[in-house]
Amino acid sequence: MHKRRVLKSVLGIFLSLTVSHASFASDDAAPAAAAVPQPAQDAAFKSWLEGVRTEALERGIKADTLDQVLPTIVPVERVIKRDRNQPEVKQTYALYLKSRVSDWRKEKGALMMKEHGEALRSAGERFGVQPRFIAAIWGIETNYGTVPLSYSVFDAVATLAYDKRRATRFRRELFAALEILDKGYAEFDLMKGSWAGAMGQPQFMPESYLKFAVDHDGDGSPNIWTSKPDVFASIAHYLNSYGWQDDQTWGRKVKLPKGGEASLQGAQTDGLKPDSWCAAYKSMGVWRDLQDWQALGVRRLNGKDLPPRSIPAALIVGDEGDDEGYLVYRNFCSVMRYNPSFKYALAVGLLSDVIAKD
């Protein structure tokens, strides 16, 4: 009940404010919100923007940049609704994976691997990431660059910064977005993204853009909106920065022994010590050598033995009752840094398996 009261209160603030922009997620387009003529903005929001301006000037953002952006910012009610109802939380594994690893994505991904093979290989070789994983993230994020990104990044991150739930994080994102424009990395009209402010074809948040976006085509600016070389290299750079190992895959779907969904799970402290990036995700549970999982009765989905390689692996149990799960390796954690959701990382891994063969 408390969360409902908070949401009702937050939405009440926004009802008096302008709602603008069509609403698009990574996978489905929602009907456009009714456009409302811009009245004088709510006094509390205007005061909040003045505080943003003061801090931005202190951070070195030019006044001309702030004059260009701040008067255009309007909060978007639907952003708050989407933030409270993300599919990674609400959907079962089966439904989530079926929608993300769709027949269309598989077929389109195979075509994209051929059509953009040279650019994918170039980015992969530069950062030590297999091209199929770059393409899979590209596919999951924006349907290989075909999803229209209609939200103003500034509207999206300002809406979430003004909301109290994740205000600190998104206030940083707002300043990062202003820095991107201020430094000339992108024009104002190009600053389009998702409902949460994730930008361009790889769906980088503004802070991630500043850290990981790459000018791979050599034109002087990292362009993650329209330059495929920059898109691919930026994804690869991101994964590489979080310890990607190109001599490993992500993991595999497996068959568990009867009762294994419960009996095989354990705490992270019960097994091998995972490396640093994986240790952060304690809910992944116990890590064991792949051969120890074999000894415990875990098999490939077709019933055959697991690979003979000795490698640390954790068990992800999805929807209960089917005696199936996923053994995941080090690179799974790198994908989790892209989006900290088991379902998301599994979708990337499963899609990468079918769009190309090593």
Image: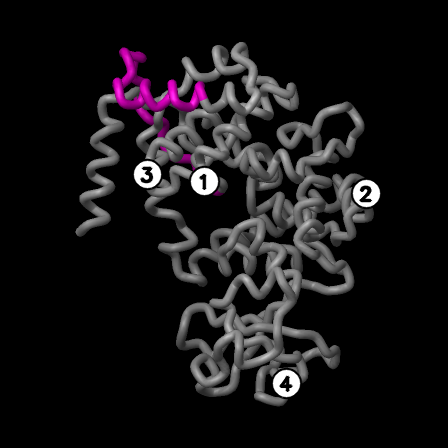
Identity, as a three-letter code, of the amino acid under mark 4: Asp
Q: Which mark is residue 169?
A: 1
Q: Is residue 340 above or below residue 23?
A: below
Report helix, strand or loop for mark 3: loop
Identity, as a three-letter code, of the amino acid under mark 2: Ser
- Tell me which segment is drawn in magenta: 27-54
The residues tagged by marks 1 and 2 sit, at their Cα atoms, a distance apart of: 34 Å
Residue at image coords 22%, 42%: 6
Give neighbour class at mark 2: few <14, some 14-19, many 20+ (Cα, 10 Å). Answer: some
Residue with the mark numbered 2 = 122
Mark 1 vs mark 4: which is more N-terminal?
1
Farthest residue toward the front?
Answer: 58
Whether the residues at callouts 2 and 3 have beta carbons within 8 Å, the answer is no
Residue 220 in view of the camera: yes
* Image location (x, y in percent) of residue 87: 40, 50
The reply, left or right, for residue 37 in relation to residue 131 is left
Residue with the mark numbered 3 = 164
Whether the residues at callouts 1 and 4 have beta carbons within 8 Å, the answer is no
Residue with the mark numbered 4 = 292
Q: Is residue 317 above or below residue 136?
A: below
* Image location (x, y in percent) of residue 192: 52, 26
Looking at the image, which is closer to me, 230 or 172?
172
The reply, left or right, for residue 175 in relation to residue 89 is right
Identity, as a three-letter code, of the amino acid under mark 1: Arg
Report helix, strand or loop for mark 1: helix
Mark 2 vs mark 3: which is more N-terminal?
2
Identity, as a three-letter code, of the amino acid under mark 3: Lys
